[in-house]
Amino acid sequence: MSVHVLLFDAGSENEGIHSLELNGATVVLLFEDRDDAERYAGLLEAQDFPVPTVEAIERQDMEEFCSNAGYEARFVPSGFLPQTPEERLLIAPPEKNMDVTTWRDQPDPEARPSEEPISTGNSELEDFRRRLEGLL
C-alpha cells in the first residue's frame, strides 16, 4: 500500500521530508489520500513555507525509514477527523513553524572541503539536520 509524504527539493541533493515535533518526537505524516497530502502542502505554502512535492511511497518502506532514522511514522487515514488538538496537526500544520532556512545551508564539499557545516545554535534542529543529511 502506498502512502503520500511531503518532500522538499525532491530528487535534489538537498531533499528533505516534512516532519512535525510532537511531544519531543519527530513525526513524519503518511497520508493515505493524495488529496489530503496536497491540501496539507497547500496550507504549508500559505504559511510561506517552502513548497513541498507530494510523493507516493510504499508504507512499509516509509515506516522502516522512519524507524531507522528515529522518527515516528504517523498514518493519516482518508477521512480522518481529529479528536484532540495534537491530532489536528495531522490535517493542518501548526500556526508557528520552525525556521527551515538552514536545511539548505550545506557547504559545497568541492568548494570548501575543510569547513564545518553551518551551525544554527539549536541542538534539536542540528540533530534533525544531521539525520536528514544521513539520508543522502
Image (spheres, helix red, strand yellow):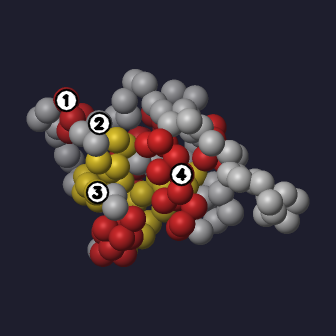
Q: Are marks 2 and 1 in contact (CB under 8 Å)?
A: yes
Residue at the image position 29 percent from the left and 36 percent from the top: 89
Query: Which is more foreground, mark 2 or mark 4?
Result: 4
Horizontal relation, residue 40 to residue 126: left or right: left
Q: Residue at x 49, y 55 (%)?
A: 17
Q: Which numbered dot is residue 85?
A: 1
Q: Nearer the viewer, residue 72 or 70?
A: 70
Q: Position of residue 116 (x, y in %)?
A: 71, 53
Q: Quadrant of residue 15?
A: bottom right
The residue that label 3 is drawn on is: 72
Considering only order in the chain, which callout, 2 or 3, is on the residue closer to the N terminus? 3
Q: Quote the CA–CA distance across marks 3 and 1.
A: 18 Å
Instruction: Provide the secondary structure element on which disc 2 rests.
Output: loop
Q: Amino acid at mark 3?
A: Glu
Precedes in sequence: disc 4 or disc 3: 3
Report if the CB atoms under discs 3 and 1 are less than 8 Å apart: no
Q: Nearer the viewer, mark 1 or mark 4?
A: 4
Crowd band around label 1 with a 10 angstrom C-alpha radius: few (<14), some (14–19), many (20+): few
| Residue matched to label 4 | 129
Q: Residue 84 location in percent, x, y?
A: 14, 32
Amino acid type at mark 4: Arg
Q: Please give the name of the residue rendered at 36% of the width and 53% of the height, measured from the top-left corner.
A: 28
